[in-house]
């Protein structure tokens, strides 16, 4: 499944939010745990920092990528709801539609293909 882009207007400019490997790695580079940030969105009172960090990370693909300082200035009481909804939508769009079988099982030895990849 391809990751779907989520469009959000911030500071008078349309931006694309994308939940992808670059976003997840950007959060790790900040010392943050992606799944912990996501879980905090499920609480009755989500942490503002989680919303900010996820929004910033989902803009990782932009060139140049906006700074955390820029992103936090772009979100105000006027667009907070739209920004939060876009963050949640970008997260949901980054989840595969069906369960993947996972990586192939290890082979039986050196030079042996994994058993689940052998021709039948």
Image: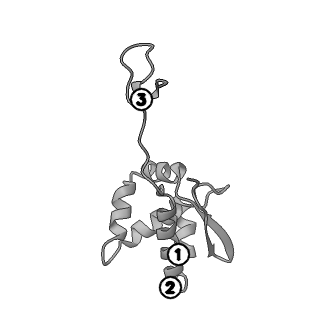
Residue carrying label 1: 83
* Neighbourhood count class around disc 1 (C-alpha, 10 Å): few under 14, some 14–19, many 20 upward: many
Secondary element at image label 1:
helix
Of tags 2 and 1, the one toward the viewer is 1
Instruction: Looking at the picture, tell me which residue is in the foreground, 95 or 78.
Output: 95
In primary-sequence order, the first of circles 1 and 3 is 1
View extreme (bottom): residue: 78
Q: Say which element carries label 3.
A: helix
Q: Are marks 2 and 3 in contact (CB under 8 Å)?
A: no
Mark number, residue 116: 3
* Comparing labels 1 and 3, the label whose residue is closer to the camera: 3
Mark 2 falls on what kind of element? loop
User: Callout 2 environment at 10 Å: few (<14), some (14 to 19), or many (20+)?
Assistant: few
Where's residue 28, x and y in %?
A: 43, 49
* Of pointers 2 and 3, the one earlier in the residue sequence: 2
- Using the numbered discs, state the Cα–Cα distance from disc 2 to disc 3 in whole angstroms: 53 Å
Q: Is residue 16 above or below residue 119?
A: below
Left or right placement of residue 112 versus residue 39 in this view: right
Mark in the foreground, 2 or 3: 3
Which dot marks residue 42?
none
Disc 2 target residue: 77
Distance from Cα at disc 1 to Cα at disc 3: 44 Å
How many marks the image carries: the answer is 3
Color scheme of the displayed model: one colour
Q: Residue at x 36, y 54 (%)?
A: 33
Q: Residue at x 45, y 48 (%)?
A: 29
Mark closest to the chain's N terminus, 2 or 1: 2
Q: Residue at x 57, y 67 (%)?
A: 70
Q: Are marks 2 and 1 in contact (CB under 8 Å)?
A: no
């Amino acid at each position: 499944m391809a990751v779907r882009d989520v469009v959000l207007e911030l500071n008078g400019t349309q931006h694309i939010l994308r939940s992808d490997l670059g976003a997840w790695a950007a959060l790790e580079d900040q010392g943050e745990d992606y799944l912990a940030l996501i879980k905090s969105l499920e609480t009755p009172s989500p942490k503002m920092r989680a919303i900010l960090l996820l929004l910033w990370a989902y803009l990782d693909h932009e060139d140049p990528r906006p700074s955390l300082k820029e992103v936090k200035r772009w979100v105000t009481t006027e667009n907070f709801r739209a920004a939060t909804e876009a963050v949640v939508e970008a997260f949901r769009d980054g989840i595969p539609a069906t369960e993947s079988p996972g990586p192939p099982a290890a082979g039986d030895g050196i030079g042996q293909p994994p058993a689940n990849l052998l021709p039948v």
